[in-house]
Image (cartoon, rainbow, N blue to C red):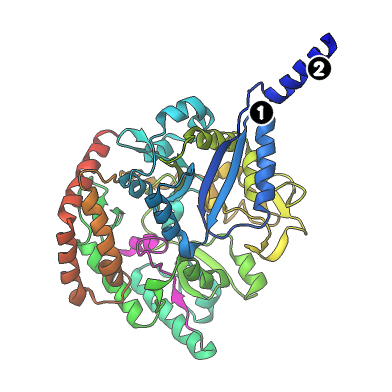
Amino acid sequence: MAKKLATWLLLLSVLTFSAAGTVFAEEEALPMRWLIPGEEPYDVDMVEEALEEMMREDGLNIDLDFMFFNWDVWDQKVNVMLASGDEFELINTLDNGSPSTTSLMSKNAIIPLNDLLEEYGQDMLALFDEASWQQATINGNIMAIPAPWIDMKVENYMCMRQDMLDKYGLDLPNTLDELLAACETIYNGELEETGTPWYIALRAEGNVGLFTPLQRGIDGYPFKIVDLMVILFEDGSAESYLESDQFKQWCEFAYEANQKGMIFPDLLSMNTGSVGEPTERGNFLASDRNFTGERTIRANYDENARLVNFYLNREEPTVRFSAYPNCNTVSATSPHPEAAIMFLNWLYSDAFHMQTLLYGIEGTHWIDEGGREMSYTEYNTNEEGNGGYQYAFPSSWINYAPYLRFEKGTDYEGSATIEYSYDESTKTSLNSGFMYAPDKAAAEYANCKSVITTYINPILLGFQSYDEAFPAALQRMKDAGLDKVIEEIIEQHEAFLANK
């Protein structure tokens, strides 16, 4: 009897305690449902199981569910889930896209993380720098977990085809006028030679992607644009962006480019993925930066392609307006928000944890080539997969730059260094990290965002003339409550500067 009791107690201890001594087997695993934009990678279930097993070995009992939604339905799916109050733990958040941290805050869709981080996120609190946490903090509350996978100086950079500049005897542009002239020459030449139009790769959202580096060519730069409603200058001043000379100058550039056929004719109805396809193939006039895509373009589409990454107004230094481009936020509907922080803290606590998420199971999906190099296995190579691989997690949604690996042969000590290493010569903007959180003007902000989509973006992207269409569009913005939103943004900006 004593032997049976001892055996039973031993079995109970095995079932109840992990190697780290944490009780979890008698309880159900905590759910960690993560909303992620883009195409679901092949083998994602296999990688989820591997991560779960690794966490169990470290004393965490978490059930992962990576919920991917293709870009063409991303906004719709997220909005439906938020409106329905669906339970999930984590959502990928795009501070220059949709949804942003502040837009989720305005819907009461996410929660402050200060207490959760103190209890479950000490590794992350120590890992990320002060600038990242400053950007993640809004009105005194930490609202997001940064994904600082890239130095945000890259927002200064844009990309062109160096071989096309050489083909037509063109110098690298340094002003918007020079850029427009170079693009027009390439556009006309390639259209005549191949019958295929090439485009300047602006995006339907208007104020993301290539829009940002092109602002270097606008008078008064550097400045930061907040939700297309306020423009912040380096002297600490702020004013209405839509009523500024900078907005008018931009619209005149976009309209001229559009009139000459160099903007996607269906851009206003195109999703981000569709806009990115010509860039991935290499037949673009100008795009936002592309430091690592040349090998893929040359291997799959055009062996003569040569890319050049550069910035306009090269007499002036590069400027960093934010600490990170993307982040992750915790849902207000989660019954166990601690699971999200526990998972992310574990993920960021060890480079190999992150690399398993990003590249898959070592030996099955990728091979350690030493240093920071890796290669994908023959099994994982599949042209029908995400990015040409059966498993490849989008690293821009979650990462930390020192954890990144590079495919064997990548010049990660050269061109890729621009992206993944901190540049001391880049000027950090006075306004870096400022984010507007709709509060007293939340209803007006939502109304204005709707008007921007319908009436401002067609002007911003050059489909309508500023002189003809803007007066009526501005009045619609005023009717929607623009002035109240501007007042609140400037009020929050003044408080932000006062606390720096």
Segment tinted magenta in the rendering: 197-218
- Residue type pointed to by label 1: Ala
- Where residue 82 appears, x then y in whole percent? 40, 50
Which residue matches tag 2? 7
Label 1 to label 2: alpha-carbon separation? 18 Å
Q: Circle 1 — which element?
A: loop
Q: Nearer the viewer, residue 350 or 357?
A: 357
Indicate left or right for 186 with 138 as reference.
Answer: right
State the quadrant of the N terminus: top right
Identity of the residue drawn at 24% across and 48% down: 442
Decide: marks 1, 2 in contact (CB < 8 A)?
Answer: no
Identity of the residue drawn at 26% across and 38% down: 497
Which tag, 1 or 2, sits closer to the chain's start?
A: 2
- Residue type pointed to by label 2: Thr
Label 2: few (<14), some (14–19) or many (≥20) C-alpha neighbours in 10 Å: few
- Would residue 455 be counted in the magenta stretch? no
**Residue 220 quadrant:** bottom left
State the quadrant of the C terminus: top left
Q: Which mark is residue 330?
A: none
Q: Circle 2 — which element?
A: helix
Label 1: few (<14), some (14–19) or many (≥20) C-alpha neighbours in 10 Å: some
Identity of the residue drawn at 59% across and 73% down: 305
Identity of the residue drawn at 42% across and 44% down: 323
Q: Which mark is residue 25?
A: 1
- Where residue 214 appears, x then y in whole percent? 37, 64
Q: On screen, 57 above or below 202? A: above
- Would residue 210 be counted in the magenta stretch? yes
Q: Nearer the viewer, residue 116 or 32?
A: 32
